[in-house]
Image (cartoon, rainbow, N blue to C red):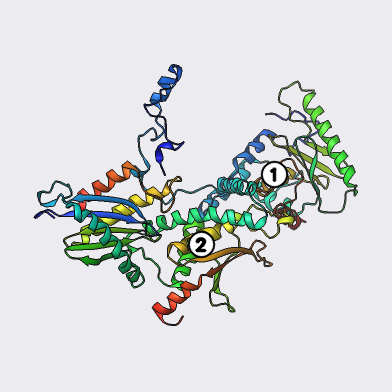
Amino acid sequence: MNRDTSPFRPASTGASPTPKHASLTASTNLRYSLTRKSIYDRHLNRTKTSELSKSAFAFLFGEMVQHAQKKVYGVQDLEKKLNQHGYAVGQRFLELLLWREGRTAKRETRILGILQFISHSLYRAIFQKPADTLEKVRENEDEYMISDNDPLVNSYISVPKEMSQLNCAAFIAGIIEAVLDGHCFPAKVTAHTAPSDMWPGRTVFLIKFEPEVLEREGLRHGST
Amino acid sequence: MPADWDIWAVSDWVTKPGEWRNEVMEEGPEELSTGSRKRERKKRRQARETGFKCSALLCSEPRPRCCRWYHIVAMVVYAVLILNKAGGLIFQRDFNPGLQKLTSNDYLILAGTFHGVHAITSQISPTNETGASGLEVLESENFVMRCFQTLTGTKFLVFAEPRQPNLDVVVRRVYELYSDYVMKNPFYQIEMPIRSEGFERHLSAYIKPHQ
Amino acid sequence: MAGSTTSYYFVIIGTKDNPLYEAEFGTFKQGGDGVPKFREEQRHMNQFIAHSSLDCIEDLQWASKEMYLKTVDKFNNTWVSCFLTGGNIKFLLLHDARSDEPIRQFFTDVYDLYCKTLMNPFYEVNMAIRSQTFDQKIKAAAKKYL
């Protein structure tokens, strides 16, 4: 954790560069942008009208999938990798979302509450639409399903036949997992393709809570 | 950029090729929100209404209605081919009977031959202008073929019934689908044959209802 | 603690009960100079008090949906106020006088700064915060509200 050895730290006054480039390096300071503003001087709120290009996102996400594909052995490994990417996004996005809600922000303390939060507030904040369904798996007490008829990340992706198990919405599963983890509801979230006639890209996120979550829910709020 | 190969082109329904090519490039991102998608659609509609001539020879309808509704609805597209920049066939799909069924090898030869002819037509121009775009339309008694080459050299060929209007719109749309569902697919290797389920699904969804 | 001026101890605790950031400051109100006036043994005690209050927080966090839990614990003369973020990061402030509203405002500012820290792609959850700018901004917020 010694920051001084970080490769991202710009060379300070210590090691002087060759005279030819001396004037160049003196005027550039990697730590701040040209306005000399750090991340702490910017505002966290974007304006309501600002939008992102779906194409730009599709290309970025595509590159991310390709990058993840390079160092994996098989589909499961790849999904895990995408899940991890999503997890990092989810951790950040959760705090940002609650920050934006301001004084009305609430921490969810119940299983149903947090699931509602994910399928409505979170989904709306990321994809501008709520998730399509939120169901409980009948056979298992600790499993829930959130379904999305057409996940945004998959809109331009066609998975080849030899990788038919893969669903790139594992990225969203990672985001969901991070939000659940953040609220102290440790769970495993996986993305499964469940096509219907109307929606060939329908994806179901299966949420399996760790046993301690149900135990706590039972102790705190009576029988669930 | 003026049409260099007017002898090939049916000039009354081809607007200036350069114009609609620029259009395709501008029509990129589908935005995330419905509001801006609406705006985008409005922009496109306006572009169509003002930027394109009616292509049908005997059409008396006002411009936007005739092209958008009547003539496209009555369209028969035989096949769509996509060639990579080296002249290799990367996609071939028949939609309607009307063309001779070839073996896959013959399709490859056809693609290679067309690639060569296209290269020759863009090199040797009788009009002595630079930047010739090469062969764009090929019309015979039994079919009309429209070719569109992207800036990167990928060629889209659409075969349709003769005297078919608005083929440029169809090619444009195929190009759009290609850039969406092929180029944005992380599992597609560039210049390789297209095996994208999403592309095929959207392509048939676009071409099939128009018959 | 010396006389009329109060001193504060502020710490950010990660999800694994690990400290991410620590600061001490004195009040600027009532003619204070902003310098903490903790005695040496009190400085060690502060960490113990903060650590022991984590149990109380873990109990309280399931009873309330609020992020600001107000005062959660008291040891001798020291109150512990807590703000719990959605990602289970705890902001603890040790103080010797009850005043809910200024502390809430202080915590809100800290939350803002913490979110900004989190937006840094090179920062990960539970990593110690070493940014000097962050430190300066926290001190500025303390000066403003405490």
Give the percent coordinates (x, y) of residue C95: 20, 59
Q: Whole-percent x and y of residue B165?
A: 76, 45
Q: In this rendering, do the residues under marks 1 and 2 share a single chain?
A: no
- Above or below for C93 versus B2: below
Q: Is residue A146 left or right of residue C99?
A: right
**Residue at 21% from the left image edge and 63% from the top image edge:** C79
Determine which residue is flagged by label 2: A177
Look at label 2 and name its amino acid. Glu
**Residue type indicated by callout 1:** Tyr
Indicate the secondary structure of the residue bearing disc 1: helix
Position of residue B198 measured from the top left corner of the image (x, y, whole percent): 69, 54
Q: Residues within 10 Å of mark 2 (few under 14, many from 20)?
A: many
Residue B141 visible (yes or no): no
Chain bearing tag 1 is B
* Quadrant of the drawing holding the C terminus of chain B: bottom right
The x and y percentages for residue B104 are 88, 46
Element at label 2: helix
In 3D space, how far apart are the residues under numbered discs 1 and 2 (Cα atoms)?
38 Å
Give the letter of the chain under mark 2.
A
Task: Answer left or right for C36 relative to A171.
Answer: left
| Residue A147 location, quadrant | bottom right
- Are the residues flagged by discs 1 and 2 in contact, CB closer than 8 Å? no
Q: Which mark is residue B175?
A: 1
Q: Is residue C103 above or below residue B62?
A: below
Please name whichever residue, B205 or C15, is drawn nearer the observer in this view of the structure. Answer: C15
Q: Is residue A147 visible?
A: yes
Looking at the image, the residue that sits furthest to the bottom is A223
Pick out the residue farthest to the front: C41
Q: Is residue C76 left or right of residue A83?
A: left
Residue at image coords 39%, 61%: C88
Q: Which mark is residue C95?
A: none
Task: State how many labels appear.
Answer: 2
